[in-house]
Amino acid sequence: MIIDTHAHIYSPDKTTYPTIEDPYTPPPGTGSPEHLREEMAKAGVERACLIQTSTFYRWDNRFTRDTSAGATEWAAGVCTLDPDNVHSPEIMYSLVERANIKGMRSVPAADGSLDHPVVRALWAQAQELGIVINALAPLGVADQLARMLDDYPDLNVVLDHCLSLTRGPQFESTVAAVVELARRPNLHAKLTFLGTGSAERYPFSDMHEALRMFVEAYGPDRCVWGSDFPTELWCPRVNYSDHLTLFQEDLGLSAGEQESILGGTAERLWFGG
């Protein structure tokens, strides 16, 4: 089973699901759940995690909620909640209880901190509910992330985009930080940075060594694949199917590594496998 752990979805109905002002918008005809299902079918992907699109809806999770609730056979929802809203833990509880929400994307508070009272309340609620935290964190709060991981040892956390690894001045320090964080056994690496962080064209060879380092540090049973759907918006140098082919053919992953990274780990985290 292949599971896409990173798909953003967009509704063409902006009356029912209004956007934020000046949203980051995918090209026409892309990004809908129907488009995602088409891409999944062509690539042989069976399930997906639907990640709340904060660059389009911010903290309004209604489209993710409604889509996830009606897609229990193939999808799990991941909400994104306001880390400065003291009511966010209550909202999480409602979404998890009613709408097939299996995770929350955790972002720093408005003051830039991840180790923040409301963020801690959200992590505590997630740990109690048994859902996964997706940590979208910059390199600058890696030490705070480590502290949070230590304080919530029973909470499964996934490092979105591996601290947003990108070729540039902070590349080596980011790689080192991601490897150091692997010492926390409750942290998992989401290997979604090749098409977004590379300075080269497909197959993004300048990112292969870092990815192999992460697989070695975390082990394949703590690594997951995601497509960055819709790729037309988030990584236009690679299409959906080729993003998967990278892991099946270009990275030199063994059959056992592929089994875990492309589905086994995700099934355990979000689908009760």
Image (cartoon, grey):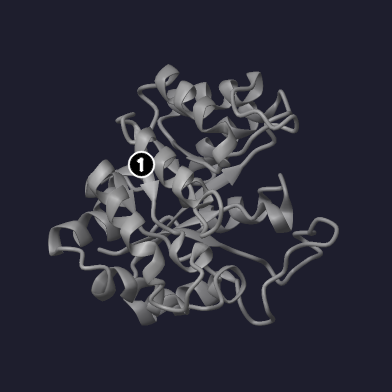
Q: 131 left or right of 56? A: left
Question: Relative to 255, is 177 above or below?
Answer: above
**In this view of the protein, which residue sits in the foreground, 180 or 14?**
180
Q: Position of residue 174 (x, y in %)?
A: 47, 45
Q: Position of residue 93 (x, y in %)?
A: 56, 30
Q: Residue at x 61, y 77 (%)?
A: 30
Helix, strand or loop status at disc 1: strand
In the picture of the structure, the residue carrying the numbered disc 1 is: 188
Residue 60 seen anywhere in this rendered image of the structure: yes
**In this view of the protein, which residue sits in the foreground, 212 or 60?**
212
Q: Position of residue 145 (x, y in %)?
A: 50, 29
Amino acid type shown at disc 1: His
Q: Residue furthest right?
A: 21
The tally of labels here is 1
Residue 101 seen anywhere in this rendered image of the structure: no
Q: Position of residue 152 (x, y in %)?
A: 42, 21
Q: Around disc 1, counting alpha carbons within 10 Å, would you say few (fewer than 14), some (14 to 19), or many (20 or more)? A: many
Q: Residue at x 80, y 59 (%)?
A: 18
Question: Relative to 156, is 72 above or below?
Answer: below
**In this view of the protein, which residue sits in the foreground, 207 or 47?**
207
Q: Residue at x 52, y 78 (%)?
A: 237
Q: Residue at x 49, y 53 (%)?
A: 165
Q: Quadrant of residue 177?
A: top left
